[in-house]
């Protein structure tokens, strides 16, 4: 059975810590044989939410580092190049142009910050009503992004939970219980547009999350709605996390009745048995 990590960051991301080769070797040591790099290309500056004209400045560096990873990693590994394209709904024209770059096998679509607002990572959460207001806007923006043809798979549906929980609001969740209507609408739009979702496994190493992003009930609903395109990723930013949580993520998918996981080559999905 293949073990696949389709969400990894290298030093081509400002919050990365290792080269692509180092990440690939670490993934291999962890038993992962199929990987895709998804370094950040965020349409906005994460610190202030303003448009970032420089967001694609690492394009050449990514190509070079990818070549180095391909030649240095064990031959049996299957290594692909992608990006995590953030905030495509803030400037769809630019996002679609970036996504049309021919070198990418796969594009994750994310919302890390709301329009004109810093990354959820950097926000201050003064009280619960602030959190809920921000999450409400986040759901609206995900629905907008779902209709922009600039990605293959929507990343980490429920991202703000990492930070509202860190701020002490531990009972807030983004699941069918709390945002069922919004989530159904987002999944429906993704399926209609031929896009998928990811099982983001970073929550397994975060005790405040303690599981997948999105939650298991969302993964179940996606399958029931006929969703087939689904990838799994560690969202690792350090080599020690390369491949982390992937086995747990696969177990959850199998328990939900998923038979296949998706990989991409030049933006075309392929379905591998799990
Ligand atoms: Zn992300
Ligand atoms: Zn990421």
Image (cartoon, rainbow, N blue to C red):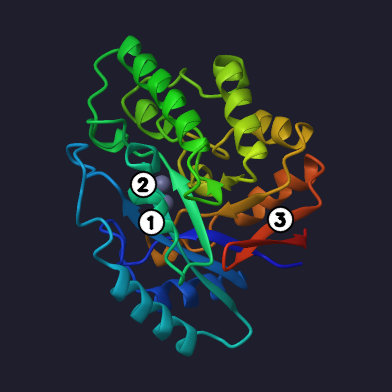
Q: Which residue is mark 1?
A: 97
Compare marks 3 and 1 and give the one earlier in the sequence: 1
Vertical placement of 229 versus 164: above or below? below
Q: Count neighbours of disc 3 (C-alpha within 10 A) and say few if under 14, some if 14 to 19, many if 20 or more.
A: many
Secondary element at tag 1:
helix
Whether residues under marks 1 and 2 lie with C-beta atoms below 8 angstroms apart, the answer is: yes
Vertical placement of 182 versus 243: above or below? above
Name the spot of residue 32 as percent of width and height, x first.
61, 69
**Residue drawn 34% across the image and 10% down it:** 129
Q: Which residue is mark 2?
A: 93
Q: Which residue is mark 3?
A: 261
Total marks in image? 3
**Residue drawn 48% across the image and 78% down it:** 25
Name the spot of residue 107 as percent of width and height, x first.
49, 56
Q: Count neighbours of disc 1 (C-alpha within 10 A) and say few if under 14, some if 14 to 19, many if 20 or more.
A: few
Vertical placement of 82 versus 198: above or below? below
Task: Between residue 252 and residue 177, name the one nearer to us.
Answer: 177
Cα gap from disc 1 to disc 2, whole angstroms: 6 Å
Compare marks 2 and 3 and give the one earlier in the sequence: 2
Q: Quadrant of residue 170?
A: top left
Q: Count neighbours of disc 2 (C-alpha within 10 A) and say few if under 14, some if 14 to 19, many if 20 or more.
A: some
């Amino acid at each position: 059975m293949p073990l696949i990590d389709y969400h990894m960051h290298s030093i081509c991301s400002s919050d990365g810590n290792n080269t692509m080769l180092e990440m690939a070797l670490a993934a291999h040591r962890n038993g992962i044989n199929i990987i895709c790099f998804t370094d950040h290309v965020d349409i906005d500056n994460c610190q202030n939410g303003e448009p970032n004209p420089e967001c694609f400045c690492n394009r050449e560096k990514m190509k070079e580092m990818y070549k180095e990873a391909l030649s240095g990693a064990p031959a049996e590994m299957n290594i692909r190049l992608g990006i995590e394209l953030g905030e495509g709904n803030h400037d769809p024209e630019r996002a679609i142009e970036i996504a049309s770059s021919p070198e990418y096998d796969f594009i994750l679509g994310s919302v890390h910050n709301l329009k004109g607002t810093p990354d959820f990572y950097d926000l201050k959460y003064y009280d619960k009503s602030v959190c809920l207001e921000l999450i409400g806007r986040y759901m609206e923006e995900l629905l907008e992004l779902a209709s922009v043809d600039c990605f293959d798979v929507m990343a980490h549906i429920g991202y703000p939970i990492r930070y509202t929980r860190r701020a002490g609001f531990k009972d807030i969740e983004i699941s069918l219980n709390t945002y069922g209507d919004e989530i159904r609408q987002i999944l429906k739009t993704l399926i209609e547009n031929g896009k998928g979702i990811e099982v983001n496994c970073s929550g397994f190493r975060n005790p405040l999350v303690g599981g997948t992003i999105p939650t298991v009930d969302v993964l179940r609903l996606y399958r029931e709605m006929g969703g087939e395109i689904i990838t799994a990723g560690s969202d690792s930013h350090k080599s020690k996390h390369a491949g982390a949580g992937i086995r747990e993520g696969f177990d959850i998918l199998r328990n939900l009745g998923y038979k296949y996981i998706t990989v991409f080559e030049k933006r075309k999905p392929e379905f591998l048995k799990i």
